[in-house]
Image: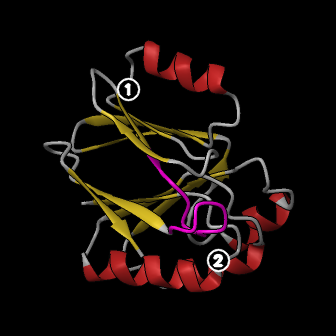
Amino acid sequence: MIGIMSDSHDNLSAIKEAVNLFNDYRVELVIHAGDLISPFTAKEFENLKCEFKAVFGNNDGERDGLRHFFKDLCPIDSLIEFEVQKRKIVVNHGTNETIIDALVKSEKYDIVIRGHTHKLGIIKGKTMVINPGETCGYLSGEKTVVLLNPVNLSYEIVTL
């Protein structure tokens, strides 16, 4: 099981809720699709009992600080590619829709994970596109994350 989140925007209580949920579900990996914002959020993510991967978002201005404080958890870059259960996954915050469209249309990936819009959306197709919405809840009023089974691509949307 994979936990997917995005746009936590320093909301420490929402991050704690997400971390607790992911630990309760014993996920093997948590993916953050950008806008961590401040380096001090690393302390909450250190409570995860699984692997963690993250990308930068458009509001992540303190990139050197984020790299430093998250160095024990994961490297952070603008785009990451990896495999889980033979599924090719790419993660990009999604600030540039042309890039997201190109990643999907390339058909190189089984799953494209993005954030940025703060709008929950999952599109199933040859390439599955997942936007877990916003973990912070600031714009929509809903704090959401996604649990994904990478084997059969079933998923559950969880409101924190």
* Mark 1 to mark 2 CA distance (whole Å): 28 Å
Closest to the observer, 105 or 29: 105
Give the quadrant of residue 26.
Answer: bottom left
| Image position, residue 45 (x, y; %) | 54, 77
Name the N-terminal-most of marks 1 and 2. Answer: 2
Which mark identifies residue 56?
A: none
Q: Overall secondary structure of the magenta stretch?
A: loop
Q: Quadrant of the N terminus?
A: bottom left
Quarter placement of the C terminus: bottom left
Say what secondary structure mark 1 lies in.
Answer: loop
* 37 lies left or right of 156: right
Quarter of the rendering containing residue 126? top left
Disc 1 marks a residue whose amino acid type is Tyr
Q: Nearer the viewer, residue 113 or 137?
A: 137
Q: What residue sits right under mark 1 in the picture?
A: 109
Q: Is residue 107 left or right of residue 47?
A: left
List the single residue furthest toward the front: 141
Q: Circle 2 sits in a helix, a strand or a loop, which is it? A: helix
Number of other residues with Cα within 10 Å of mark 2, as a class: few under 14, some 14 to 19, many 20 or more:
some
Residue 18 visible here:
yes
77 shown above or below 37? above
Amino acid under disc 2: Ala
The answer to whether any part of residue 46 appears in the image is: no
Relative to 87, 118 lies left or right: right
| Residue 42: mark | 2
Give the x, y percent position of residue 153. Answer: 20, 43
Residue 120 on image: x %, y %: 46, 49
Residue 138 image offset from top left, x and y in percent = 66, 68
Left or right placement of residue 147 versus residue 159 in this view: left
Residue ranking furthest to the left: 152
What residue range appears in magenta? 131-142
